[in-house]
Amino acid sequence: MRHQNPQPCIQFLGGVGTVTGSKFLVSLGSEKILIDCGLFQGLKELRLQNWAEFPIDPRSITAVVLTHAHLDHSGYLPLLVKKGFAGKIYCTPPTRDLSKIILEDSAEIQEEDADYANKKGYSKHDPAKPLYTIEDVRRSLRHFTVVPNSDWFKINDRIKFRFKPNGHILGSAFIELKIGTTKITFSGDMGRKNPIILNPSSSPEKTDFLIVESTYGDRLHPNLSPARELKRIINETLARKGKLIIPSFAVGRAQDLLHLLSQLRAQNDIPNVPIYLDSPMGIHATDIFMAHSKWHKLKNNEVDALGRIAVMVRKQRNSIEIAEKKQSSIIIAGSGMLSGGRVLHHLEKCLPDERNTVLIVGFQAASTRGRLLKEGIPELKIHGKYIPVHARIEEISGLSAHGDQKEILDWLKQFKTAPKNTFIVHGEPQASDALRVCIQDRLGWNCTIPKPFDHFILPN
Ligand SMILES: [Zn+2]
């Protein structure tokens, strides 16, 4: 029988046709590398996919390599380990620290949801079970192995990879994977050209195949300075004697906001009202940010100012007290898409009053409360009640941690030659398609928008 060398393949197990659930499986013969292992979030039909049987036997996966810690890239790991994955999970040091708090928080939410469903008796399963528990998270954390720098790291004789910082969140990277003789580059979530507190992305070189995200593939961020916009919104809200509620992701956005607020305050651009970071995870992420000085661009005095600008609200009891107060203040609270967390009781109190402002600062997936507010919904359902929306709804999309169409294109232009194929992932369908058209027209590259579970051979 003629011996044939196996060809590398890629299969898209998540993170296509949506911005969540990223899981890209690269294989060469019996070797299988999973790039990211995210949870599906948002619409119920997406979330249900987290409960489906994993499409391959997790025991057959050699290793997982993580681009960054966000839940939609790391959140399925506890389940993967529970289902038998026994290999290593490679990541940068900040990704390891951030994944720990993100996964623990996720398990807590899963356990609370299951308890709640049991109490209310609305679960189809009896009793309702969490997707995974804190104990599952602890077990998965034992598989994490940090790679401290951007050097090539050998998984075995045929597979190596390296992390290149990409300016999306602390510790985030794009990944270059060499499998056999084929090089595949995964953009991860693309950062901004000039991130507020992080270093800009490293440049890519050359690759055989490219997997690129497209969250903002159909949009350009407005050319407004986030600091100036924030200053305007704060001053207008405070002039009306209102409160400013900023729903924010705990990791990244919250630290960007703290830095901008500390700068505005130092320049006397905003009045001296109380600022709260009302998010235990946000507080924890801020501590991790401050501990990893090599991974961001702030100077020590700027880090100190960032850490001092807000009252850190650790206890739920204090959070409720702050929500009851009528006094003007600035409150940063999770969750970022308003799907849960402490921001909900602030919104319940603040939305009916036209003096207040809700400031949207991040991507809002379809059908989330954040998206509904942006689209001008007159009443928002919170804790089973319809709350009238009279507060102003503002948005600073310039604070997004994702590059826009132009920023993605500028990053792609740095490749010295065109990849053989560019797979466009991690976007809602219209965003991915707009980026496809743009790459084909402007760069003349081959592009493919994979569908869930699509499988491609990647010949060298
Ligand atoms: Zn991300």
Image (tube, helix red, strand yellow):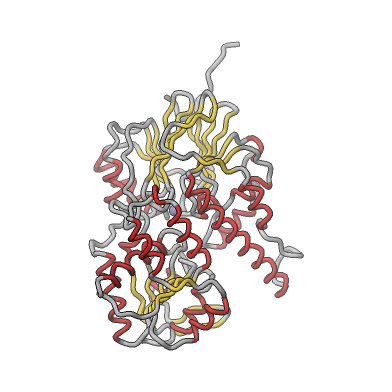
Furthest residue toward right: 126
Which quarter of the image is occupied by the N terminus?
top right
Residue at 28% over, 57% down: 220
- Front residue of this view, candidates 120 and 333: 333
8 on left or right of 303: right
Residue with the most extreme top position: 1
Total number of numbered discs in the rendering:
0
Task: Tell me if residue 101 comes above or below residue 275 in the rendering.
Answer: above
Residue 310 in the image: state x and y as whole percent.
41, 72
| Quadrant including the C terminus | top left
Q: Quadrant of residue 361?
A: bottom left
As drawn, is 19 to the left or to the right of 191? right
Which percent across, then down, holds residue 178?
45, 29
Q: Residue at x 51, y 76 (%)?
A: 344
Residue 279 seen anywhere in this rendered image of the structure: yes
Nearer to the camera, 64 or 195: 195
Is residue 139 or residue 390 the one in the foreground?
Answer: 139
**The one of 459 and 146 positioned closer to us in this rendering:** 146
Residue 186's image quarter? top left
Whether 393 is drawn above or below 44: the answer is below
Q: Is residue 305 above or below residue 168?
A: below
Evaluate whether residue 217 shows in this view.
Answer: no
**How far across and down, in percent of the image, does residue 258 sit?**
38, 66
Point out residue 454 in the picture as x, y percentages from the top left corner.
Answer: 51, 40
